[in-house]
Amino acid sequence: MQEKNINISLLKIYNKLRSNHKNGLAIVTVDRESCNGCFNKITPQKQLDIKQYKQYIFCEHCGRILIDCQIDK
């Protein structure tokens, strides 16, 4: 996907997150009910919101954008 097709405010958040973390990961999956960035538990309600793609969900601990590990391809 080209950057010109992405919401500018979301792109700014993404770039800031990438620069804030040593490994450069701004988007991580939720696997086994935990964030794969910081490995803290994610509440069941947030997990449901992530699976339903209702909104962008951020980890409360590390701030990364969370996505479902079972992404439809």
Image (cartoon, rainbow, N blue to C red):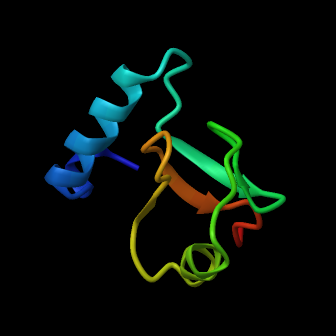
Residue 22 position within the rendered picture, expressed as x and y whole percent measured from the top left: 51, 15
Q: Residue furthest top?
A: 22
Q: How many marks?
A: 0
> Would residue 70 appear left or right of 4 to someone viewing this image?
right
Residue 56 position within the rendered picture, expressed as x and y whole percent measured from the top left: 40, 66
> Would residue 1 appear left or right of 50 to someone viewing this image?
left
Q: Nearer the viewer, residue 57 or 62?
A: 62
Residue 70 position within the rendered picture, expressed as x and y whole percent measured from the top left: 77, 67
Q: Residue furthest right?
A: 32
> Residue at 50% across / 52% down in the picture?
59
> Residue at 63% across / 70% down in the picture?
43
> Residue at 41% across / 50% down in the picture?
1
- Quadrant (top left/top right/bottom left/bottom right) for the C terminus: bottom right
Q: Nearer the viewer, residue 58 or 68?
A: 58
> Residue at 26% across / 43% down in the picture?
13
Residue 16 position within the rendered picture, expressed as x and y whole percent measured from the top left: 28, 31
Q: Nearer the viewer, residue 20 or 4?
A: 20
